[in-house]
Image: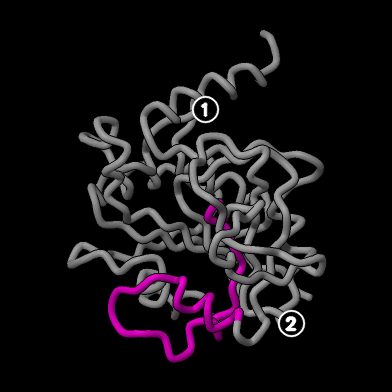
Amino acid sequence: MSSPTRAMIMAAGLGTRMRPLTNDRPKPLVVVGGKTLIDHAIDRLVAAGVTILVVNVHYKAEMIREHLAGRKDVEIHFSDESDGLLGTGGGVAKALAKFANEPFFIHNSDTIWVEGYGAALERMKSRWNPDQMDALLLMAPMVTAMGYEGTGDFMMDGEGLLSRVPPGRVSPFAYPGVQIVHPRLFENAPAGGFSTNILWDRAIEKERLFGVRLDGVWIHVGTPQAVAEADAFLADLAPAA
């Protein structure tokens, strides 16, 4: 099966929890481990064979446009949400025509991780089956996640089939913001702004929402303190000069 060569990077958020670091810049341009968050995402996607990127923008959009003008290793298009944020689902739906009706990656601009065995995006590509799936989500084990304080997002069975967490239960997996989707996931999507959760629930009902485990350490950088902790962790991993 052909692998996705297109991707959308979600970069339109306000980054309110990251203040004061986002007072003068959008969250995707916050530097972690010597590199902006959005460049972490783009580098991984390019390494996985992505050649066309769509980046949605809203808060301090011109700063993102100017920063990415320096990237010549991938074709970049922008989806402008200056008139109003459209959410995780609405933002993608607005840009859907740019994906030529092909499966594509969706990658949050603020998610980073340290690889374990192999590369996570390559494992996603090898697991992706559009005949069986409407979406394939990367799943980060809670036991190795850094900076994440939630109770998990999905249950995953031995075949990778995802379901919602039953009341009173805690999931061993968190969603770190990376997925492969088929455009049909967005069929009959709501107009305007909405959450991808609506579409995931529809896919769960059809048993077409799947996950693949991240064999590495996901670093959730949602606050300035988390950025400092991530910097320290990545510095410890860096080879000595």
Crowding near the residue tagged with mark 2, few <14, some 14–19, many ≥20 C-alpha atoms within 10 Å: few
Query: Position of 34 compared to 172: left or right?
Result: left
Span highlighted in magenta in the image: 175-204
Callout 1 secondary element: helix
Q: Are marks 2 and 1 in contact (CB under 8 Å)?
A: no
- The residue under label 2 is 132
Name the one closer to the observer, 149 or 203: 149
Callout 2 secondary element: loop
Q: Which circle marks residue 215 in the picture?
A: none
Q: What is the quadrant of the C terminus in the image? A: top right
Q: What is the quadrant of the N terminus in the image? A: bottom right
* Magenta-drawn stretch contains 186: yes
Does any portion of residue 102 appear in the rendered image?
A: no
Residue 199 location in percent, x, y? 49, 78
Q: Which residue is located at x 43 percent, y 91 percent?
A: 188
Asked if 20 appears above or below 178 in the picture, the reply is above
- The residue under label 1 is 230
Q: Which residue is located at x 38 percent, y 53 percent?
A: 11
- Which residue type carries mark 1? Ala
Q: Please identify the quarter of the rendering in which residue 134 is found.
A: bottom right
